[in-house]
Image (cartoon, rainbow, N blue to C red):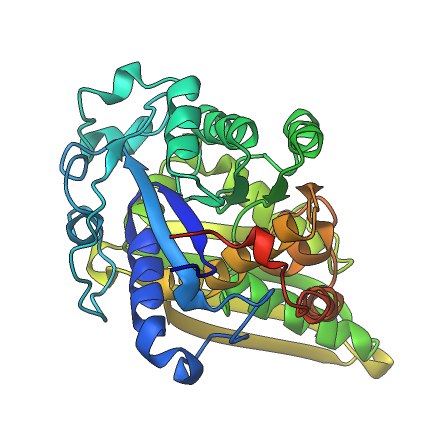
Amino acid sequence: MTERCIRVALAGVGSCASSFVQAVVLSRSAEQDMPGLMHHRIGGYRLGDVEFVAALDVDHRKVGIDLAEAIGTAPTVAVRHVAVPPMGLKVGAGPLLDGVEGKLSKIVEPHPDCGSVTASMVTAALRDAETDVLVCFLPTGARAAVQMYARACAEAGAAFVNATPEPVANCPELAALFLERGVPLLGDDLRSHLGATTLHTALIELLGSRGVRIADTYQLNVGGNMDFYNLSDPARSHSKQLSKRRALASTGLDATDVAAGPNGYVKYLGDRKVCFLRIEAEGMLGSPLSMEIRLEVEDSPNAAAVVANAVRVARSAADQGLSGVVDPVCAFLFKSPPLGMPESEALRCFQTFVEKSAAPVPAALAHTT
């Protein structure tokens, strides 16, 4: 039978991957009613058209077991909202490099095969699986590993979605490589569907549209998943801090000295993230204005809602022959895109891309399964 699908590989099988897999499984029976799903179709693709064809990790507890089991294996703390049946896909050993340096080394024991995995082996695995899109869910700070996956994707002809703040779309060498190989690239640093950064930038834009002058602001975040545990190590959180400030700077705010980013690991929170925002501003006649907001979200499903857009955008971009960084969508999907935009402009550009992608894809581009 011939049907259109998006063949997706996962680099990192943690909490965000768990929620994304669950969302795909749920969407196959209830997609039109799913809250948080912005578009039933992007480029003609439903979320249920995602087919997982490869998954790589370094944790010895996950390598070698079915993906459906791995997404619930410690140290993953994502809530099980959906019963995922066995998928017939075993998690493979990924390249180790700097993936579990720092505090993560106390939690994750690498599988013995990971130390010998090379970029060429990853490329071969992606080719063998006929991968369309790889989503990189590696830990913040694992720059060497993230960039190895990016190079492997470019060589394999698979689009790359960089959910991490490590520079890929912002690396001129890698951006040029994807352009040269004719492969789409999306990044960097996934922006939660409605998280701290989205709320913060939207409020800053709202105040600016009224001519209100912002004097000071901060954004403090705490959570209990492995992302927050990893980011509690100062050596691993630097790129995340930069990414947050870049997102705020896209609103026109001087974010050089703004405190914004992960501020603590609180184990009992599990996959919940709590954000505290404060904005101090000046209105007409120098009158003071201030606001404080507490936002609590379940972190991984919030990310999965964005990945649901990103993988379909990436496949649609490939169908259209686009390559290199897909700038019109990155400002909406990521915190640190090469071309930053205010929230409203980013949304407009994303929606325009989706609308232009609505034309049917030639049958020759469909996979045969």
Q: Nearer the viewer, residue 84 or 169?
A: 84
Q: Quadrant of the N terminus?
A: bottom left
241 relative to 182, above or below: below
Q: Nearer the viewer, residue 356 or 33?
A: 356
Q: Quadrant of residue 33?
A: bottom left
Q: Quadrant of residue 278?
A: bottom right
Q: Is residue 52 visible?
A: yes
Q: Residue furthest top?
A: 116
- Compared across the picture, whether 337 is left or right of 286 comes to left
314 relative to 168, above or below: below
- Compared across the picture, whether 101 is left or right of 88 comes to right
49 relative to 247, above or below: below
Q: Residue furthest bottom?
A: 33
Q: Nearer the viewer, residue 184 or 369?
A: 369
Q: Nearer the viewer, residue 43 or 300?
A: 43
Residue 6, horizontal then vertical, whole percent: 46, 54
Residue 132, horizontal then vertical, whole percent: 49, 45
Q: Residue at x 56, y 31 (%)?
A: 154
356 relative to 87, above or below: below
Residue 15, horizontal then vertical, whole percent: 29, 53
